[in-house]
Amino acid sequence: MKTFSKRALLRASAAPAILGASLIATAAFAQDAPQAAEAEAGDTIVVTGSRIARPDLTGTSPVSVVTSQEIQLQANSANIENVLNDFPQITPTQSSTSNNPGGGVATVNLRNLGSQRTLVLVDGRRYMSYDVSQVVDLNTIPSALIERVDVVTGGQSAVYGSDAIGGVVNFILKRDFQGVELNSSYNVTEEGDGQIWDISGTIGSNFDDGRGNVTLFGQYTKRKPTYAGARGFSRNALSDRQDGSAPFIGGGSGSVPQGRVIIPGLGAATGLGCDSQDFSADGSSTCYNSVADSYNFAPVNYLQVPQERFLISAMAQYEINEHFTPYMEAQFVNNRVNAELAATPISQGTPFGEGTIGALTIPVNSAFLAPSLRAALTTLDTDGDGYVQAPSWAFRTTQIGPRGNADERNAFRVVAGMKGDIGAGFSYDGYYSYARTKNSQRQSGNVAIDRFLASVSGCRGGETGCAPGNIFGLNNLSQEAIDYMSIGATNLETYTTEVASFAITNGELFDLGAGGVGIAFGAEWRREAGEVEPDEYLSSGNVAGFNPGSPTAGSYTVREFFGEVRVPLLRESFVHKLELNGAARASKYSNAPGNVFTWSAGAELAPVPDLTFRAQYQKAIRGPSVSELFLGNTVSFEGNAEGCDTAAAAAAGALRELCLSQGVPAAVLDDPAARAALGDPNLVNPLTFTGGNPNLREESAKTYTIGAVFSPSFLPGFSATVDYYNIKIDGYIAPVPTDTIGSLCFDSLNLDYCSLIKRNSLGQIDSFEAFNLNSGGLKTAGIDVTANYGLPLGKFMGSEDAKLTFSFNGSRLLKSDYTPVIGVDKVIDCEGRFGTQCGVPTPKWRHTLRTGLELSKVSMSVQWRYIGKSRDDDDDTLYGSEKIKGFSYFDMTFNADVTDNFTLGAGVSNMFNKNPPLSASGQNGGNGEQTNTYPTLYEVLGRSFFLSGKLRF
């Protein structure tokens, strides 16, 4: 084990002082009212996955519960995604370590089906989306106000509507809070960085003999950045040669600050023998070496993105009488998160207008070039106009500084409703909610493309204010040229969700002798609307740095009617219990999906009290999001998918003819080095053009679960569940991946997909077209296992409260097949795999095991997090990282009730300081995500410590 550094210990020792000061400043005590999860015997509660109250916490759909106590045991619990991402059923996709791609948000992704296929609720109601993708940012949920989190896997559209294909994550907030509570926590890594400080306060009061309650909550979170340069594994941008070389070649990007060009005939004209050349400070050129001369962009990227968040929440209700209890909720969140990337790369493939920039115009008599190079270029100026064209070129504006992206999201949500008894056992609950998120995205470090081109060409067009720019050699740009070409840019984004819902329930409609038959029915109206307003640079494409895009604007509405029934058939008969349930929902969309019907049916059978079998079948849907429908044409860089860089393309045959027809010169195909360079990610990183499709229909899923619950009477305190799940999605909405486009074109010779590839005059791929379609399908299946046991230790420890606890949650993935295009023989098997097609590793096995010791006033626990092994998803390419071994992380926590009113907690995460596995990013020819690994799944900051405190009054 690594010895703790002195710096880390000094900074960690500062945490108690900071924590103590914050606690003393507003010392108070709190008392919680009883919560639904702790309902007394005979009470009825609402279980996530159903609207009908029932006398127990079981149901036909598997439900995992994260309690507030579990959240307190977790380091970094100020951000709830760090707790949820430990769930084996959840695949981490966006978190505090997401810098590129990022966006300053944290999401939850059940079954690796995509965050947009996991419905996030707060107290059973839809919450506010962070943008036009209609996904909830978990940063907007008050973590210290959470009583528990219910995770329901499998489709739940019949009960809750669209988006619940993967399942539902329902955050249950504390209710009827009485008193004052103050929480604070501080996190720091062993290296003394990555600090997170969080403080929150809750004040609540019951009044008028408990008929009313008002609860107010406030939270402030400050997270400091950590740069990739601060860790050895991420300090250098690794490149993958796709030849199995061990493990990677240090390098980076072919967009270099010294400038690089490829000009046919330049090697012969200069006598260097190579057409790909970069520049020295004096304007002379040398042969470009993609390993030795590439730019290391890694150190200035964030490994942990900084965040500053303010959150306030208010809840109130008052029971006027048993028939009428009005209530309200309000939340406001200000969340500021920055991303930082290396300085702007600009090349022939950089977006401009309706396409890409293309060739660079270079004055042959430029004073910025060495005399020998000017002479060589003069021989290439065949038309004598004083200029030559560089079909392929690249430059990086390091003198301007890194690219910064500052997201400031202001989001608010209000809920106003009423509930009460109607009579005859019926009750109602109706509400209206309005949520609005506005994001101001301020960018820095960008370059105006037209000004850059004018500057590099020597200002031959006479543009006002133009200053000649010298990109031929390191740090040769003048300040005047920098000021002329550099710009900021702005995206303004607004998203609103409105919901009006009314439901009537009766948990005891009549009794068939086995318990009350329960029903629920109601209606719901929802409106989703959003817009993105890029400024003139981003919308026109006249920007290099952050990706441009056209404006996005659109909305749609949904009108729905739903019903649900629960029918106990047998109780204490020849079987202990038999119960059936069903749900249905009819929806009418104002856009292409039109009329949609979803339904579910399930059963519970307990032959004996100790054992219950359960099964559920559901048809679920997901309507297309505003982004998928109306996204303005935009660009991204998804990596190369070249197929003309192989020896097969040089041989006579259909592939060669295809490559020639696309514009690859025969001389390139016949030259092994030139042919291989077509697919070199350090030289060619094509654009991907994507956009919305207003004709999209809904995704449809068929999902079923079969399982058992075992709670043996002969072993008090023990319970276990085993559930099999199977999900099949048709009409999967996604752009066709560039890798699939390449495969269908070059392997299957499908000309429809070949038409989506555009090349430049050198034969290099300039761009792919990949717009949203209902073209795909997905199948996934697996087995979830949970076990919990509490062993009393009173007779051994001399305390009646002493207990040893075990909590296990494991998931075995049996199938994960993605079909990008239905009807085309290409299925991507992602079971136990990772890479450019499957993304974040989805190992066949993941689990968590927490072992705890509870005494009267002290508790401690150790958690084992295991991520199984996985292998690369592309059998035809030999990467430097073909396999990732299984990873085990261990965390330890300690809690003590120092007084009746003060609780102190401490812990360490990633106790053995394990570094993540290495994989070069897809843009560098590898099969990783960012910072040379998959930072959302594996620990990237190393060993870290946390200290927390709670005061109650």
Image (cartoon, helix red, strand yellow):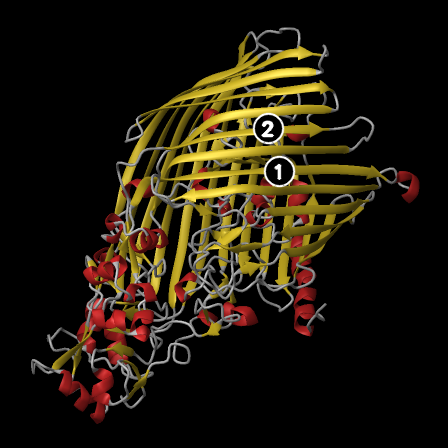
Tell me if 211 is positioned left or right of 337 in this view. right
Q: Which residue is mark 1?
A: 784
First of labels 2, 1 by sequence position: 2
The residue at the point 23 percent across, 58 percent down is: 658
The circle on residue 706 is 2
Relative depth, front residue between 341 and 586: 586
| Residue 687, horizontal then vertical, whole percent | 29, 60
Label 2 SS: strand
Indicate the amino acid at tag 2.
Ile
In the picture, the quarter occupied by the C terminus is: top right
Q: Nearer the viewer, residue 485 or 314?
A: 485
**Residue plotted at (56% across, 39% down):** 216
Check disc 1 and report its element: helix, strand or loop: strand
Residue 841, given in percent of the width and then of the height, sits at 52, 52
Image quadrant of residue 943?
A: bottom right
Query: Local crowd at mark 1 within 10 Å, few (<14), some, or many (≥20)?
Result: many
Label 2 – label 1 distance at C-alpha: 10 Å
- Residue 732 in sight here: yes
- 829 is higher (above) or lower (below) than 233: above
Would you call the spot at circle 2 few (<14 residues within 10 Å), some (14-19), or many (20 or more)? many
Quadrant assignment, res 321: top right
Q: Looking at the image, which is closer to me, 303 or 924?
A: 924
Q: Position of residue 756 (x, y in %)?
A: 25, 52
Residue located at (40% from left, 69% from top): 342
Q: Position of residue 643 (x, y in %)?
A: 32, 60
Q: Is residue 449 above or below residue 430?
A: below
Residue 953, visible in the rendered structure: no
Q: Amino acid at mark 1?
A: Asp
Q: Is residue 35 left or right of residue 303?
A: right
Q: Quadrant of residue 764?
A: bottom left
Residues 789 and 874: in front is 874
User: For the N terminus, which image quadrant?
Assistant: bottom right
